[in-house]
Image (cartoon, helix red, strand yellow):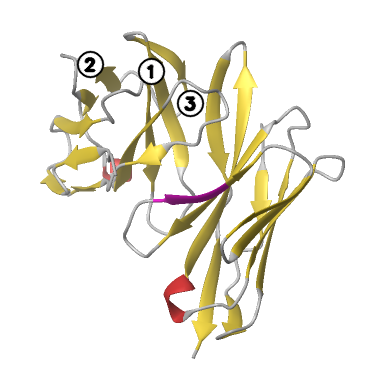
């Protein structure tokens, strides 16, 4: 069973501060990693993808990947109240040529004005 | 921006009834998926579909479930005889051909079985 683990939170961060979200995964062969944002009652929305070790920046978001430690993180700089949502870590796994995303339980983030 | 469209947004059905959830994936995408999310729980994989056949299905996707691509645009999930525990949000997703691509999710159908 391929697992993706996240701290469910809630994580409360003051407006303007950096929010740090973490994820670990069990399948050492995974190559593609994604962060989705999900507002309450809505569908997951892709915000970042990362495939190589190191950092990838996109605006206020930075994804970090360490395959040796099987660890993915997401940093949100200058946090805004609109960033309040559940952040889902998703890992793409492949078996016999078939691939699918496996999601963690999500971390609920609250930005405090 | 292209989007995945799902209908209906909310469906209430009686236990034992059949339901069909509909999805229109992004037009140039070739890989399609159904996921579900029970209230308060994680997003769970149900089935993947490519080249008009199921690629992979989870343990959840038992004989009560089926998928179909009846024409060039629609992708449906049928639950033959609904149970109370089928109540969940059902998300359709699609992706482009690059293997590293993320999935684009539809807005979901909230299924309530009473």
Which class describes the residues within 10 Å of circle 2: few (<14), some (14-19), or many (20+)? Answer: some
- In whole angstroms, how far apart are the C-alphas of marks 3 and 1? 16 Å
Report which quarter residue B49 is drawn in.
top left
User: What is the chain letter for disc 2?
Assistant: B
Query: Which chain does the residue under circle 1 lie in?
Result: B
* Secondary structure under the numbered disc 3 in the rendered image: loop
Q: Earlier in the sequence, mark 1 or mark 2?
A: 1
Left or right relative to B114: residue A46: right
Residue at (60, 82) in percent of width and height:
A13
> Where residue B90 is drawn, which disc sits there?
none
Answer whether residue A45 is magenta in the image.
Answer: yes
Q: Position of residue A26 (x, y in %)?
A: 74, 38
Image height of A90 relative to A6, above or below:
above
- Numbered label attached to residue B69: 2
Q: Quadrant of the N terminus of chain B?
A: top left
Q: Is residue A1 above or below residue B1?
A: above
Residue that numbered label 1 is attached to = B49
For disc 3, the marked residue is: B59
Chain part drawn in magenta:
A44-48
Marks 3/1 same chain: yes
Mark 2–mark 3 distance (CA, rounded to whole Å): 21 Å
Prevailing secondary structure class for the magenta stretch in the rendered image? strand
């Amino acid at each position: 069973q391929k697992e993706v683990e996240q701290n469910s939170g809630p994580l409360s961060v003051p407006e303007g501060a950096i929010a740090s979200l973490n994820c670990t995964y069990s399948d050492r062969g995974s190559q593609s990693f994604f962060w989705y944002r999900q507002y309450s009652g809505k569908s997951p929305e892709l915000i970042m993808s990362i495939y190589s070790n190191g950092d990838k920046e996109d605006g206020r978001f930075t994804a970090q990947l360490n395959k040796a430690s099987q660890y993915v993180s997401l940093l949100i700089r200058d946090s805004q109240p609109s960033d309040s949502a559940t952040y889902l870590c998703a890992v793409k796994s492949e078996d016999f040529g078939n691939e699918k995303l496996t999601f963690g339980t999500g971390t609920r983030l609250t930005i405090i004005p | 921006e292209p989007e995945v469209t799902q209908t209906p947004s909310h469906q209430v059905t009686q236990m034992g009834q059949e339901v069909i959830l509909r999805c229109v994936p992004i037009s140039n995408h070739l890989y399609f998926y159904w996921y579900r999310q029970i209230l308060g729980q994680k997003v769970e994989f149900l089935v993947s579909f490519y080249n008009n056949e199921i690629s992979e299905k989870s343990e959840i996707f038992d004989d009560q479930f089926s998928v179909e691509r009846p024409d060039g645009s629609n992708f449906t999930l049928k639950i033959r005889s609904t149970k109370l525990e089928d109540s969940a949000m059902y998300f359709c997703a699609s992706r482009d051909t690059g293997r590293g691509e993320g999935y684009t999710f539809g807005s979901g159908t909230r299924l309530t079985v009473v």
